Image (cartoon, helix red, strand yellow):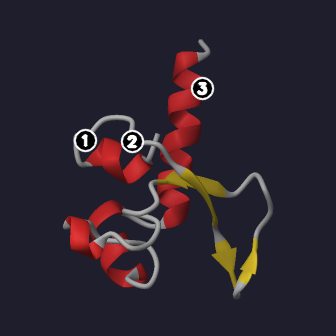
Amino acid sequence: GCIACQRDGLGNRAAAVHHILRGGQRMGHLFTLPLCDPGHHQGGQPLGMVSRHPWWARFEAKYGTELELLAMLQNERKASHG
């Protein structure tokens, strides 16, 4: 589910794939985040959510950088797999 919804305590809301960018280009398929759509990926303002697009700075101020969120997901996977 959406990593931002999980951090907000909203559970596992269905998510779309968001590719992390560096220098305006996708870093690759291993550098992705699950973000709900509409919602935390884009179009979330009417729902009371901070969307990554176009509110990148507000999104990172609330949830951390995209690379920090990716590291959290990777650590959770490691912990659940022993």
In three-dimensional space, the C-alpha distance between marks 3 and 1, rounded to whole angstroms, equals 23 Å
Q: How many marks?
A: 3
The residue carrying pointer 3 sits among few (fewer than 14), some (14 to 19) or many (20 or more) residues within 10 Å by Cα, namely: few
Q: Please name which of the two marks, 3 or 1, marks the residue nearer to the observer.
A: 1
Q: Please name which of the two marks, 3 or 2, marks the residue nearer to the observer.
A: 2
Label placed on residue 10: 1
Write down the quadrant of residue 65 in the picture.
bottom left
Secondary structure of residue under mark 2: loop
Residue 17, percent from left and from top: 62, 55
The residue carrying pointer 1 sits among few (fewer than 14), some (14 to 19) or many (20 or more) residues within 10 Å by Cα, namely: few
Residue 14, percent from left and from top: 47, 43
Write down the quadrant of residue 54 in the picture.
bottom left
* Type of the residue with mark 1: Leu
Between 67 and 53, the one nearer to me in the picture:
53
Residue 64, percent from left and from top: 38, 64
Between 64 and 32, the one nearer to me in the picture:
32
Q: Earlier in the sequence, mark 3 or mark 1?
A: 1
Task: Identify residue for label 2.
Answer: 13
Tag 1–tag 2 contact (CB < 8 Å): yes
Left or right of 73 on screen, residue 43 = left
In three-dimensional space, the C-alpha distance between marks 1 and 2, rounded to whole angstroms, equals 7 Å
Toward the right, the furthest residue is: 28
Label placed on residue 78: 3
